[in-house]
Image (cartoon, rainbow, N blue to C red):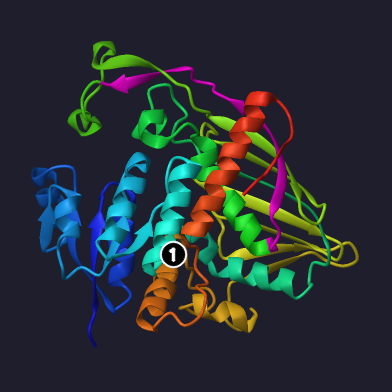
Amino acid sequence: MERMKVGIIGTGFIGPAHIEALRRLGNVEVVALAECSQDVAKAKAEMLGVEECYGDYKQLLRNGDIQSVHICSPNYLHYEMAKEALEAGKHVICEKPLAISVTEARQLVELANKTGLVNAVNFNIRYYPLMRQVKTMVEKGDIGDLFAVHGSYLQDWLFYRSDYNWRLEPERSGQSRAIADIGSHWMDLIEYITGLKIQEVCADFATFHKVRKKPLKPIETYAGKILQPEDYEDMPINTEDYATVLFRFENDARGVMTVNQVAAGRKNRLYFELDGSKQSIAWESEKPNQIWIGKRDGSNELMMRDPSLVYPETMALIDYPGGHNEGFPDTFKQIFKEIYAYISGGRSNPPSFPTFKDGLREIVLCETIMASNKNRTWVKVVQ
């Protein structure tokens, strides 16, 4: 079996997650990676066991053996890298956000359509097996008509004023942070499982740490040391730590989402509840192998991720028996499995995985939400 050769651009937190998941597929080989310098690329390649490395992503794109590229770099680089990868004839799998503006994202959608190359955005949360189960339950009418959706995405990795990361810098991450970084996952997931589009939004943002302490040197320099006041500089923060957004859906259902990156004790908790005319369904990412089913007349239920319990449509995302938990790393494997099966199979049908069009949708939602917060009013979503 000939294996597809893949290159990875960016090896911070998410790049190695892509590499690990791709190696689990069997029909894909990670042959090269690119970083910001040759020294960094060489060190990462040795650590991750990748044979070829480049200190400039353009060199990776010139490698004729590479058929597909995964873009795992900071947000502001996504547009340029995805554009050049498509122009080089590579299939592209991009981390979200696809770009940092609607204009850039639209250009990428148009270019991808023109080239006919496979394009995908890594909305991996769709690929927890029970998300396919919930989607199927909604489609089969198990919850009835959807009345309301509510939930949150909470983290605490920016809890302290001294917590710092490039995502706090708008010139590298974009004008929105909490909404674009984690709210985009929540909104994509809700539109995916309900099949309903958000039509109007009303948002309220807050920045609790208006000034943060930025280390003057790379954080690795301080491993095992106590930082002194002179090791920091004060940096004004202009992106949101927190946001609450009200939604109106196309079927007149209502919704509300809260995102918060300074929620102590919440490491990475996405939660939602769908309230329907027959029953309710709830799920949270820190307990990903069960869904709660709420009933008015009868006992509530906990449904476990078990091949013997789910609908047939869910089976493709389950690789282990009940009781053998599947979690965050498995979502990467499952989405990449669909993408590369699609590439290998000749692409005769519309893709089931999230594409650049889905990436554009989330940027449209984010920009609409920012406009609502700025104007303090409801704003219609215009695709």
Whether 313 is among the magenta residues is no
**Magenta part mainly helix, strand or loop?**
strand
* Residue type pointed to by label 1: Asn
Residue 13 lies, with reference to residue 222, above or below; the image says: below
The N terminus, quarter of image: bottom left
Q: Position of residue 372 (x, y in %)?
A: 66, 31
Q: Is residue 260 left or right of residue 378?
A: left
Q: Position of residue 284 (x, y in %)?
A: 60, 54
Q: Secondary structure at mark 1?
A: helix
Q: Position of residue 244 (x, y in %)?
A: 66, 35
Q: Which residue is mark 1?
A: 113
Number of marks: 1
Q: Residue furthest top?
A: 230
Task: Determine the residue positioned at 79% across, 67% down.
Answer: 143
Query: Nearest the camera: 163 or 15?
Result: 15
Query: Nearest the camera: 326 or 46?
Result: 46
Q: Position of residue 212 (x, y in %)?
A: 40, 19
Task: Determine the residue positioned at 83% across, 63% down.
Answer: 145
Task: Determine the residue positioned at 65% across, 46% down.
Answer: 382
Q: Quadrant of residue 305?
A: bottom right
Q: Residue furthest bottom?
A: 1
Q: Residue furthest right?
A: 297
